[in-house]
Image (spheres, rainbow, N blue to C red):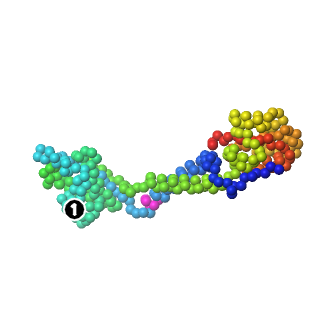
Amino acid sequence: MIMASYDPGRQGIDTKRLFCQIIHKIWIIIAATMIGAIIGISAYILYAHTVSGDTVYRISNDYYITFNYDEYPNGVDYYNAYTWDSILRDDPIVLYAMSLMPGMEKDKILESVSGEMLGDYRILTVHVTGTDPDTVLEISDAYKQALPHFATDIDMLSHIDVWTDSDMVVYDAYTRDGNAAFLGALIGLVISLFIMLIYYTVDDGIYSERDWVSRYPDIPFLGYEDTDEARANTEYIVGDMEGIRELPVSDLLFDVDAFKEMRALKGVILKVTQGKDKGDVIDKAVYTLSKQDVHISGVLMKKDKKI
């Protein structure tokens, strides 16, 4: 009797077979990666916006700076993008702003105010950021007066005007939505690949000629269906196809008359579908035909288009 010689416990990892299995079940990896990303970003949003603390508010106003070019043609070199962020927190501006806000602590202003220039040294953006919207609004309004007043004390500056008066917005300077999604997707990917390795060890489907030969060395592997390889091997090994029947392993019926008819033939050529016909189905067909004295002339494999 023909018996399968495959022993999964003694087989090393066949990278080609593993690749075929991954392609065959690629939807698992894609789904796990997407679910991981969704879980990651959802967990972050839940933590960052519900558990971790207060909402952050910001007002960003633009100021137009007019320099005293007639007397100080190089004034813009001093009052540039680098220096303004520091100047906004220096005493001349901060102390004047405090005079407009009785009771406001200096440290509160210093930690709330920042500035930047994006290319044009005439446009200064002042950000006021904090968790108390009333404090943010109060400091922002004070700076609308403190900056124009500062220009009157500095010879290099002609005047500073409010260019845009923006509304308050909810702001998260430390958002990690993208990072959380990436980490979740990475975890999902790793878990899915680990699952695929487990699947590799338990999946006894036939994916290649090597799989077949390692399990049924006594049954010739004729090749993949409708290929020159299969036609050449069939002609050489099987010969004349008269008296030969092709039998998909999944179509085997335990019918006495069918077995009698097959015994009268020269033999049968088994047909298996790559990756889909599993070991128990193939074993059952091979063992049954062997017990029924039906000659198995070879096997043809039908390719799975997804692999």
Query: Which one is in front, 271 or 173?
Result: 271
Seen in the picture, residue 140 relative to 229 is either above or below; the reply is below
Q: Which residue is mark 1?
A: 98
10 Å crowding of disc 1: few (<14), some (14-19), many (20+): some
Q: Position of residue 163 (x, y in %)?
A: 24, 47
Q: Quadrant of residue 153?
A: bottom left
> Would residue 143 be visible to someone looking at this image?
no
92 shown above or below 28: below
Say if 2 sits above or below 227 in the image. Answer: below
Residue 149 in the image: state x and y as whole percent: 17, 54
For the image, the number of numbered tags is 1
Q: Residue 138: x, y in percent?
A: 27, 59
The amino acid on which the numbered mark 1 sits, given as a three-letter code, is Met
Which one is in front, 98 or 69?
69
Q: Residue at coordinates 63% horizontally, 42% vertically from top-left?
A: 306
| Left or right: 264, with 223 as reference point | right
Which region is colored magenta?
A: 46-50
Confirm whether the magenta stretch covers residue 270: no
Q: Nearer the viewer, residue 269 or 119?
A: 269
Look at the numbered disc 1 and give the secondary structure of its residue: helix
**What predominant SS class does the magenta segment belong to?**
helix
Residue at image x 38%, y 57%? 174
Which residue ends up furthest to the front in the rendered image? Answer: 236
